[in-house]
């Protein structure tokens, strides 16, 4: 059983859940990374594509596309789900998926897991049990899940990742 977050049927940059995708980079903190987000056909199917260059200059190091899960940035209860499922393709690099809950107050806090892309479409499952706390002591509270981010982070590289759909799985 799955619950849809985005299937790319809403007009860009909107998601099927009614929220809006946004691209964010370390430039908000003085970094030098840059990124773009487009809706385009990638390898034969509609996709949300993030491309950019991750730079470690000026204490930087990330580019991300992020989506609120609840109305007006509020939290949702995802405790009935086992994790997130993504249809993804990319440039054979490692990326992160970050979760934010209503308990997170600092921009550098999140719950994180990594995954690798390949240059063809595949569906990956990221169980919530694989996410680790980053700069926060509170355990992941799925009943207060607020935001997801697909992130190119931590090293200098050219990011190119496309998402064809994202949903919760049980």
Image: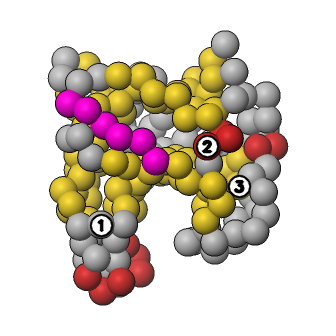
How crowded is the residue under tag 2: few (<14 C-alpha within 10 Å), some, or many (20+)? few
Per the model, the C-alpha gap separating discs 2 and 1 is 21 Å
Q: Dot 2: what SS? A: helix
Name which residue lies at 23% across and 46% down: 160
- Name the residue that disc number 1 marks: 155
Where residue 112 sits in the image (x, y, percent)?
Answer: 56, 54
- Name the residue that disc number 3 marks: 101
Quarter of the image for the N terminus: give it: top right
Q: Which residues are magenta?
A: 114-119
Depicted 107 relative to depicted 70: above or below? below
Q: Dot 3: what SS? A: strand
Q: Dot 1: what SS? A: loop
Q: Earlier in the sequence, mark 3 or mark 2?
A: 3
Q: Quadrant of residue 3?
A: top right
Between circles 3 and 2, the one closer to the viewer is 2
Per the model, the C-alpha gap separating discs 3 and 1 is 25 Å
Where residue 163 sits in the image (x, y, percent)?
Answer: 36, 33
Q: Earlier in the sequence, mark 3 or mark 1?
A: 3
Depicted 122 relative to depicted 137: above or below? above
Name which residue lies at 76% across and 44% down: 142
């Amino acid at each position: 059983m799955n619950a849809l977050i985005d299937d790319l049927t809403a007009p860009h940059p909107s998601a099927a859940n009614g929220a809006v995708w946004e691209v964010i980079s370390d430039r908000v903190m003085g970094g030098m990374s840059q990124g773009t987000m487009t809706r385009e056909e990638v390898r034969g199917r509609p996709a949300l594509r993030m491309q950019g260059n991750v730079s470690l200059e000026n204490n930087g190091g990330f580019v991300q596309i992020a989506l609120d899960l609840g109305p007006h940035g509020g939290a949702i209860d995802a405790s009935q789900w086992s994790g997130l499922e993504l249809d993804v393709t990319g440039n054979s690099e490692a990326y992160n998926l970050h979760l934010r809950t209503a308990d997170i107050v600092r921009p550098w806090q999140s719950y994180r897991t990594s995954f690798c892309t390949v240059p063809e479409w595949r569906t990956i499952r990221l169980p919530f049990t694989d996410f680790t706390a980053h700069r926060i002591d509170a355990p992941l509270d799925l009943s207060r899940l607020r935001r997801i981010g697909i992130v190119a982070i931590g090293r200098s590289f050219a990011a190119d990742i496309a998402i064809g759909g994202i949903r919760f799985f049980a």
